[in-house]
Amino acid sequence: MYKDLKKKDFTHYTQNGILNMLDRNRRIKDRPERFQDSVEQFDLVVTVEERVYDQVIEYLHSNSTGSCKSVHVVNIDVLDNHDDATIGSFLICELCEALLKEEDLDDSIESVIADFEVKHSKEMLHSIAFY
């Protein structure tokens, strides 16, 4: 995608930040990753768009492994641009650090999220699903 946009209109896609964002993404990960392709079972899944949050919940509900392991799915809406993505990454890091400090995630996640929402004036979605 980076090479294609660079060929089409280097100046335009550089000015609007798309090439910089794609270049950064190329350095961070080898290829796009799909949650559905992972065999790993997570304690927490964080999404940055409500549409993706809904898809994760739907996937977990329709593809249960029968292990009954719980997973918390949390959404923090982040606009898809360089500045908001940077701020969003710091917010997600702060949330994860706060959750890591808790002894029992299941008992404390609601209060951690509530405190986080008040501190940052940001509404979040949270749901529990099972593998």
Image (cartoon, rainbow, N blue to C red):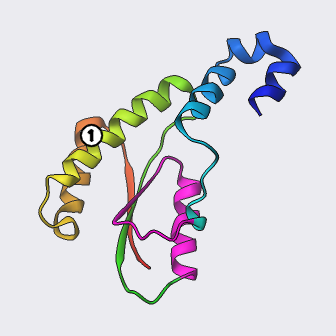
Query: Which residue sits furthest left?
Result: 103
Q: Amino acid at mark 1?
A: Glu
Magenta segment = 38-63
Query: Which residue sits furthest bottom?
Result: 66
Please indicate whether residue 114 sits to the left or right of residue 66 in the image: left
Quarter of the image where one finds residue 34: bottom right
Please indicate whether residue 25 sits to the left or right of residue 121 in the image: right
Residue 32 placed where, x, y %? 64, 48
Residue 116 placed where, x, y %? 25, 45
Residue 103 placed where, x, y %? 11, 63
Please indicate whether residue 25 sits to the left or right of residue 118 in the image: right
Query: Which residue sits furthest front?
Result: 30
Residue 117 placed where, x, y %? 28, 45
Would you call the spot at circle 1 few (<14 residues within 10 Å), some (14-19), or many (20 or more)? few
Where does label 1 land, which residue? 94
Secondary structure of the residue carrying numbered label 1:
helix
* In the rendered image, the vertical position of residue 71 relative to residue 63, given as above or below: above
Quarter of the image where one finds residue 21: top right
Quarter of the image where one finds residue 59: bottom right
* In the rendered image, the vertical position of residue 49 relative to residue 54, given as above or below: above
Q: Is residue 55 magenta?
A: yes
Residue for point 52% across, 79% down:
61
Question: Observer-nearest residue: 47 or 54?
Answer: 47
Q: Is residue 127 magenta?
A: no
Q: Which quarter shows the C terminus?
A: bottom left
Residue for point 26% across, 53% down:
113
Please indicate whether residue 77 sits to the left or right of residue 44 in the image: right
